[in-house]
Image: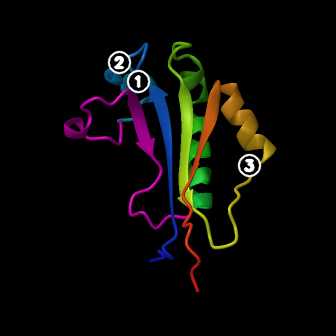
């Protein structure tokens, strides 16, 4: 069975290898999107850019760019071992499986020492 549903999930993540969850929240002035009960074994502070799940990939990328821009100094001053990632998971439109990033976005992410993680979900069946 093929699932024609399109969805996108973008989140900003900071590794908790060298800094605690509370320290990240204090330094960035943002609470994690992951509730305490779901944190068992979690090694990341996570800030999701989606709420209802209906937000487009483009709008979520705009939001994460705004969050990073507003907190660039704070993110850049986290410990070096506190990896900063933008996790992008999405299912592409049929026949379209790419995403592009403009120079400003890439430069902004580089300025805080961050990296992109792309996690594309595809349906391998032949839908008609």
Q: Residue furthest left?
A: 37
Residue 41 is drawn in which quadrant?
A: top left
Residue lying at the far right in this picture: please name it: 103
In the drawing, does residue 38 fall left or right of residue 66?
left
Where is residue 55 shown, x and y percent of the image? 50, 64
Residue 33 in percent (x, y) is at 35, 42
State the SS at label 2: loop
Q: Check if mark 1's residue and mark 2's residue have beta carbons within 8 Å.
A: yes
Q: Which residue corresponds to the image point at 57% horizontal and 81% vertical from the top-left?
A: 127
Sequence-wise, which precedes: disc 3 or disc 2? 2
**Predominant secondary structure in magenta?**
loop
Task: Assign a secondary structure to mark 1.
Answer: helix
Q: Which mark is residue 24?
A: 1
Badge 3 element:
loop
Q: Residue at x 48, y 73 (%)?
A: 5
Residue bearing the label numbered 3: 101
């Amino acid at each position: 069975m093929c699932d024609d549903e399109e969805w996108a999930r973008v989140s900003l993540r900071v590794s908790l290898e060298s800094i605690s969850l509370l320290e990240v929240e204090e330094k960035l002035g943002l609470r994690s999107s992951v509730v305490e009960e779901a944190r068992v074994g979690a090694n990341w502070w996570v800030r999701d850019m989606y709420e209802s799940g209906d937000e487009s990939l483009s709008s979520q990328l705009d939001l994460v760019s705004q969050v990073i821009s507003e907190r660039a100094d704070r993110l850049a001053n986290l410990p070096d071992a506190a990896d900063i990632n933008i996790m992008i998971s999405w299912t592409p439109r049929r026949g379209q499986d790419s995403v592009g990033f403009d120079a400003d976005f890439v430069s902004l992410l580089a300025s805080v020492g961050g990296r992109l993680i792309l996690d594309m979900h595809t349906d391998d069946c032949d839908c008609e």
